[in-house]
Image: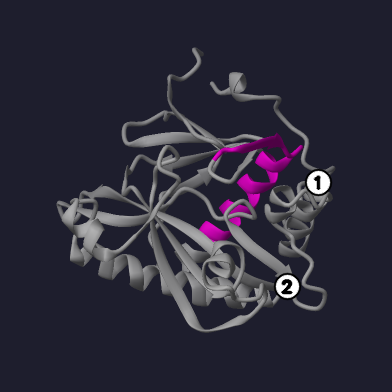
């Protein structure tokens, strides 16, 4: 069987055409980037762990009625997803001050925010993913007011659910990034919004409840060491650490 055609390669994943129309194969890489692609490296086994973690979280969210692009996991590094028209906006939900929020407003890392804050960023590495407002989003036609209302509602719902889920395994959900896309719905004959991309320690800040140890990509950003172990610990607490550890296929050339 011939290799499938590559559709897109991002910083952490590669997308290939899927076996059926309207589907894609999403391959998780071990590559790691930070600071808008200025810092690059490799986290051994990250792709395997993120595939499993994102699968688990997407399935749990689907159970509470959050529509996602996820269909099923194919193997240790790949999952079948619906092909979506990605909205070029990153939605960041913040519960605790950290990262750029702390720098912008001089708030000490770890300060619990009065309420969850939702921010929007335009997806553009060249421009440094600038923060944008609803006015920018609607004026430039990236999404409608109705889209934004739904995105806000779904983002807060995801936050409520994941905050509780992670708290149950001894982790604080400090902040996280979501992406959404549009997909054609045969039943309604309309385009509908779905949660896309992934949810993993790559795009969530997760701190241990007791020690505030960081179990996410901040360990890579800050050269703290123990990055692989942090990702493994998240998977272990979720009960999905692959048997024998995160070992599997060597790279995208295995996609069939």
Q: In this view, does 36 lie to the left or right of 75?
A: left
Is residue 43 found inside the magenta-colored segment of the image? Answer: yes
Q: Residues within 10 Å of mark 1 (few under 14, many from 20)?
A: few
Q: Which mark is residue 243?
A: 1
Task: Let me know if residue 46 appears in the view.
Answer: yes
Q: Which of marks 2 and 1 is nearer the N terminus?
A: 2
**Residue 56, located in which quarter of the rendered image?**
bottom right
Q: Where is residue 116 in the image (x, y as percent from the top left)?
A: 48, 78
Residue 31 covered by magenta stretch: no
The magenta span reads 37-59
Work out whether 250 lies above or below 163.
above
- Crowding at label 2, few (<14), some or many (≥20) Cα neighbours within 10 Å? some
Q: Which of 105 and 243 is in front in this view?
A: 105
Residue 193 coordinates in the image, percent (x, y): 29, 57
Q: Can residue 64 be seen in this view?
A: no
What is the chief secondary structure element of the magenta stretch?
helix
Residue at 25%, 57% (x, y): give it. 137
> Percent from the top left, x then y, of residue 40?
65, 35
The circle drawn on residue 65 is none
Q: Seen in the image, is 65 located left or right of residue 223?
A: left
The label on residue 169 is: 2
Q: In which quarter of the image is residue 215?
A: bottom right
Q: Is mark 2 on a helix, strand or loop?
A: loop
Q: Does 46 sit above or below residue 58? A: above
């Amino acid at each position: 069987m011939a290799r499938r055609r590559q559709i897109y390669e991002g910083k952490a994943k590669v997308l290939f055409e899927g076996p059926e129309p309207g589907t894609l194969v999403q391959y998780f890489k071990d590559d790691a980037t930070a600071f808008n692609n200025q810092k690059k490296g490799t986290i051994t086994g990250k792709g395997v762990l993120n595939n499993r973690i994102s699968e688990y979280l997407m399935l749990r969210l689907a159970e509470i009625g959050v529509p996602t692009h996820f269909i099923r996991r194919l193997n240790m590094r790949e999952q079948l997803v619906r092909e979506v028209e990605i909205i070029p906006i990153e939605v960041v939900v913040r519960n605790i001050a950290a990262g750029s929020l702390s720098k912008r407003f001089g708030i000490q890392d770890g300060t619990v925010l009065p309420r969850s804050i939702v921010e929007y960023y335009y997806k553009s590495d060249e421009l440094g993913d600038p923060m944008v407002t609803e006015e920018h989003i609607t004026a430039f036609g990236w999404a409608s007011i109705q889209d934004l209302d739904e995105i806000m509602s779904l983002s807060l719902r995801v936050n409520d659910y994941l905050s509780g889920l992670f708290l149950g395994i001894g982790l604080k959900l400090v902040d996280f990034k979501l992406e959404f896309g549009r997909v054609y719905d045969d039943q309604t004959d309309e385009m509908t919004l779905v949660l896309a991309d992934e949810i993993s320690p790559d795009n969530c800040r997760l701190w241990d409840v007791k020690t505030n140890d960081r179990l996410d990509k901040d360990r890579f950003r800050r050269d703290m060491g123990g990055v692989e172990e942090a990702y493994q610990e998240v998977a272990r607490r979720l009960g999905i650490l692959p048997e024998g550890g995160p070992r599997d296929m060597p790279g995208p050339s295995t996609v069939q």
